[in-house]
Image (tube, rainbow, N blue to C red):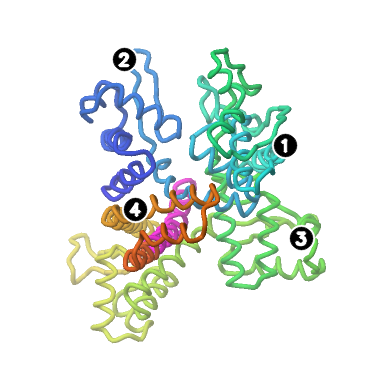
Amino acid sequence: MTQAELRLCSLLLREHFGEIVEKVGNSLLRTGPRPLRLLVGDTGLLPDQVKKALCVLLQHGLARHEARPRGPVEYEARRGRVLRLLRYPRYIYTAKALYGDAGELLVEELLLHGLLPMSSAVARVAERLADSLADGKSVDFSEVSDTFVRLADTHFIQRCPGAQQHPETAEEKDLYLVPRLALVGKGKRRRSCDEEEEGQHPAKRQRHEGGRAEPPPDDGIYWQVNAERFHQHFRDQALVSAVASRMDQTGSEVVRTMLRMSEVTTASGASHTQPLSSNEIFRSLPAGYNIGKQVLDQYLALLADDPLEFVGKSGDSGGGTYTVNLHKALGSLATATLESVVEERFGSRCARIFRLLLRKKHLEQKQVEDFAMIPAKEAKDMLYRMLSENLVSLQEIPKTPDHAPSRTFYLYTVNVAAAARTLLHRCYKSVANLMERRQHEMQENKRLLDKSQRVEAILASMQATGAEAAQLHEVEEMITGPERQQLESLKRNVNKMDASENQVDETIFVLESFIESTLRRP
């Protein structure tokens, strides 16, 4: 694990769970699997604090434990899962785009708690939706429950395997099986402490009254967000956008239809989608898309003949069968990302050399100068700059066994996988820098932010009690003009940094997907 990854993981754990969880997580990431006793010694925390931190990490799937026949239980951090914390806003935004407010809040609740029973998640979301509505309105549990079922049917959420069951050994169909629950009730708007107590969950109310709480009907069946399915959706969106920019909107819609037809049947690590016939694709096109069968066949033929090979023809039955070549598509996306980075950092001439090496595979320095039509001195300088950044590599081919420089060919080439790893490492550093800068900005303006929050709380309570406009204006003036400007400037800067983090994460996702795809390829 690189220092950049360790630093980013530490920052993510601190931001989401606080310093104690960060210390325990950091210790596990640095040292590998460890028993509780060594963790307590390494972190300098109390045993109870370490146990609670481990509970948090385990509940959110950021660590795992393994019981050994002899010796203590060992705990291990899951680096990939910790880095996914960076992608949580994208998961929530995607759920909102696909399934509306209920979908957004369901995914948010599951990410917030790590895992929840269906009954608890539905009740929480119904209450939150009711809070956002006008007075007197409520949200029926069945509305939220329907969205929950749709999320499970499309595999965006899944059951957590039982304590004795390993995730890989669980039957796939059982992971998305929603229990039949008669969830009756409405989420009501909470107005005051008294009313909140009246509208409490029955189990909580019984506990307050000293009675024994009834277990929920789905007790022991917990649900979690299926990050792999979200990643599959992000990958499909990236492929559709790439086809739209290379061809046109109709071509991208054909690819989108193919991906949608095979999204649940294709495994997350597959190199190709399931073969689909031209007739099946035609029948599955969106209703408002008026293109004939002949036009569809022409688009499929164009896609299959395209040099990028996003779509491949795998047979002639049913008007021709086609698949989306996911491995090659991810390779093209990663290559385009590398080209863009080279152009931004080193200029258009360097990008020309980089594209030339990608096309010709291996070239000597003299050949690079001739093909790229760049003077020898400039070409040499550009090649060495890219070589020092590990974006291009140099391969020696000796004519004789003694490897004498005068009798050796020196060929420049681009190892896309190695260049992608270098860029990925830089991306991790960039996100960590952005997070540290954002935290610094917030800390520098902590007093002003606290004051702003206090004023907003006073205004909210005064509005609730029906205060006059003059009184509200007087409270608003507690924040002076310069302070207001400072707050606006801080808000703009923080928003820019948040947007930058999301943009860098998009690049990280493309590079990680490509690297994983090359590792899985036989």
Look at the image and tell me in which quarter the N terminus lies: top left
Label 2 vs label 1, nearer the camera = 1
Q: Which residue is mark 2?
A: 71
Q: Between residue 136 and residue 58, name the one nearer to us.
A: 136
* Amino acid type of the residue that numbered disc 3 sits on in the rendered structure: Pro
Instruction: Report the Cα–Cα distance between label 4 and label 2.
Output: 53 Å
Q: Which residue is mark 1?
A: 142
In the picture shown, does residue 286 fall above or below 21? below
Instruction: For mark 2, give the secondary structure.
Output: loop
Q: Which residue is mark 3?
A: 286
Label 4 vs label 2, nearer the camera = 4
Q: Earlier in the sequence, mark 4 or mark 2?
A: 2
Label 4 vs label 3, nearer the camera = 4
* Amino acid type of the residue that numbered disc 4 sits on in the rendered structure: Lys
Instruction: For mark 1, give the secondary structure.
Output: helix
Label 2 vs label 3, nearer the camera = 3
Instruction: Report the Cα–Cα distance between label 2 and label 3.
Output: 59 Å
Q: Is residue 178 left or right of residue 241?
A: right
Q: Between residue 39 and residue 211, name the one nearer to us.
A: 211
- Mark 2: give few (<14), some (14-19) or many (20+) Cα within 10 Å: few
